[in-house]
């Protein structure tokens, strides 16, 4: 039974800012072992969708089930299933990496040896070993981003949600993080948002393109390839099409 | 419960990583130390001979302790907002509030954790302040009962400052603004006391509403359950408002 439920089952998500609809009726599905790329131009509503999925922002309409648990009815149980890296990594700049990750583990209810192994594992996975005693405020943007990712994967949640995880990384780090995401995707379900097409090509199994708060494409990369359509064509077409429509 | 404790301890440690807490504690101790010495000197040279001459039923505890704790209460009007301003405003400014809100913990646990950190800090402050009158034990007898009552009063007073400060800090993302709001609120409450005790026009209502009206009883060694209740309601009220504020933000 447990295996039959999908990791995310969200339908009809809506969110308004004032009268402006940031997200108007988006469905998100995710299975275990799948990496979904949420793609869209800036301001398309990607971050809002991710915030709603993590329960940091309430939905105005629609329902969300994480691993079969309703986010509205059992928020704490549902949030246990999630590791979340927000757009701006939530880092305490006056802590060292190790202290910070320990604190994060405690927030997720880990303790004792469980906590220690979790922290060591995350440090090793994100390649932070040499820096673990440094203050976070002294780290470069790339390292800070990796600490943010370490924080999200630390408690080995079934679902990992990454909001623009590769911002500020140099090409070498970029390759490492993409590799890490692919490896994590074998056992966890991952959603990542990005406005970089190549990123979706590089790591994702499936792409969902969001524009003006609505889904304009939801298809696996394999199926796109078999139709001989490139993501880039579709993306550009959609964006220019959408701008034309708003002018009309 | 465990999570609340973890948040509290971590916050408490982080308070002492900034120079702010250390500087404030040092300045407070310096000023109170000076005032304490002035009081003791004044007592020895002026008051004590008069008491002996008139056989008045006062002692060193009544005069020196009372003054010291009154000054401490007044100074804290300025200092507590500076210690509480960071609790939520800074988290919001650095985007770290998301970490707490995405974790499997409730708003109540977050707020109680933050408040716990401030309570620990308040205990440190009170320990430092109480050492001054306790040092008199080396040379004289003290009314320990009255001292305990004053300590309890100061604890409740400072806790109520902290609860109000935490709430105001949850309203904004600028710590300085939170401190200013806190300072304004506490000053208004103090002014209520002055307004309520004006000669010829005393007002029991204004004195009741003000912090200090309740504090002074404790200094005189009177633990009145009505005063305790005032502080408990004040603290619970502001903490409940803070929890509401955090929950509403999710809906926001």
Image (cartoon, coloured by chain):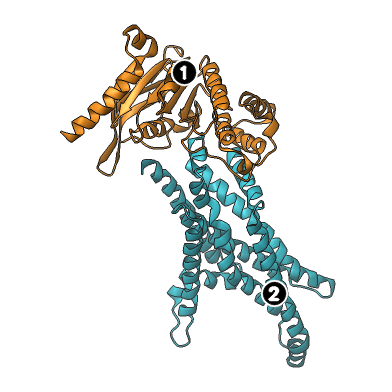
Chain colours: A orange, B cyan
Can you give x and y, in whole percent of width and height, for residue B238 in the image? 47, 56
Q: What distance separates the C-alpha of mark 2 from that of mark 1?
A: 72 Å
Number of numbered discs visible in the structure rendering: 2
Q: Which residue appears farthest toward the right when viewing the image?
A: B139
- Mark 2 element type: helix
Task: Identify the image quadrant of residue A201.
Answer: top left
Q: Residue at x 61, y 66 (%)?
A: B153
Can you give x and y, in whole percent of width and height, for residue B42 in the image? 73, 85
A236 vs A24, nearest the viewer: A236
Quadrant of the snapshot with the N terminus of chain B: top right
- Mark 1 element type: helix
Circle on res. B69? none
Quadrant of the snapshot with the C terminus of chain B: top left
Can you give x and y, in whole percent of width and height, for residue B206 in the image? 44, 74
Task: Identify the image quadrant of residue B200.
Answer: bottom left
Whether A202 is drawn above or below B216: the answer is: above
Q: Which residue appears farthest toward the top when viewing the image?
A: A226
Can you give x and y, in whole percent of width and height, for residue A98 in the image? 66, 35
Q: Residue at x 44, y 46 (%)?
A: B246
- Within 10 Å of disc 1 (Cα), the crowding (few <14, some 14-19, many 20+) is few
Which label lies toward us, 2 or 1? 1
Residue at mark 2: B65
Q: Residue at x 51, y 21 (%)?
A: A158
* Marks 2 and 1 belong to one chain: no
Q: Residue at x 78, y 84 (%)?
A: B44
- Judge whether residue A11 can be spotted in this image: no
Residue at mark 1: A202
């Amino acid at each position: 039974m447990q295996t039959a439920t999908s990791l995310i089952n969200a339908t009809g998500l809506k969110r308004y800012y004032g009268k402006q609809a940031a997200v108007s009726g988006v469905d998100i599905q995710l299975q275990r072992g799948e990496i979904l790329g949420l793609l869209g131009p800036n301001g398309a509503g990607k971050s809002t969708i991710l915030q709603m999925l993590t329960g940091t922002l309430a939905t105005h309409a629609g329902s969300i089930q994480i691993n079969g648990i309703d986010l509205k009815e059992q928020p704490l149980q549902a949030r246990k299933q999630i590791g979340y890296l927000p757009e701006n990594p939530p880092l305490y700049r006056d802590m060292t990496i190790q202290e910070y990750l320990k604190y994060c583990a405690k927030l997720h209810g880990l303790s004792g040896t469980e906590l220690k192994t979790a922290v060591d594992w995350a440090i090793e996975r994100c390649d932070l070993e040499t820096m673990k005693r440094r203050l976070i405020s002294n780290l470069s943007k790339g390292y800070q981003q990796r600490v943010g990712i370490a924080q999200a994967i630390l408690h080995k949640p079934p679902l990992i949600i990454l909001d623009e995880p590769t911002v500020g990384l140099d090409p070498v780090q970029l390759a490492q993080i993409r590799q890490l995401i692919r490896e994590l995707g074998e056992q966890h379900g991952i959603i990542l948002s990005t406005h970089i097409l190549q990123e979706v090509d590089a790591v994702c199994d499936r792409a969902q393109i969001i524009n003006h708060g609505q889904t304009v494409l939801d298809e696996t990369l394999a199926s796109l390839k078999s139709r001989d359509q490139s993501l880039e064509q579709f993306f550009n077409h959609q964006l220019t099409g959408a701008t034309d429509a708003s002018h009309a | 419960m465990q999570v609340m404790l973890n948040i509290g301890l971590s916050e408490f440690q982080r308070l002492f990583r900034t120079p702010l807490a250390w500087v404030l504690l040092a300045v407070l101790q310096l000023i109170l130390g000076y005032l304490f010495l002035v009081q003791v000197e004044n007592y020895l040279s002026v008051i004590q001979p008069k008491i002996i001459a008139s056989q008045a039923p006062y002692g060193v505890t009544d005069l020196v302790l009372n003054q010291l704790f009154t000054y401490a209460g007044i100074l804290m009007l300025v200092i507590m907002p500076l210690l509480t301003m960071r609790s939520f405003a800074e988290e919001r400014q650095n985007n770290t509030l998301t970490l707490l809100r995405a974790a499997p913990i409730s708003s109540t646990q977050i707020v109680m954790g933050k408040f716990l950190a401030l309570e620990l800090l308040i205990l440190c402050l009170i320990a430092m302040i109480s050492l001054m009158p306790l040092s008199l034990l080396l040379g004289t007898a003290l009314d320990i009962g009255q001292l305990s009552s004053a300590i309890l009063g100061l604890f409740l007073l400072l806790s109520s400052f902290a609860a109000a400060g935490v709430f105001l800090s949850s309203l904004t993302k600028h710590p300085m603004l939170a401190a200013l709001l806190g300072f304004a609120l506490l000053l208004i409450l103090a002014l209520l006391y002055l307004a309520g005790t004006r000669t010829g026009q005393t007002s029991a209502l204004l004195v009741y509403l003000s912090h200090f009206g309740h504090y002074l009883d404790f200094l005189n060694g009177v633990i009145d359950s009505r005063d305790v209740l005032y502080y408990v309601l004040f603290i619970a009220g502001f903490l409940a408002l803070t929890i509401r504020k955090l929950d509403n933000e999710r809906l926001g």
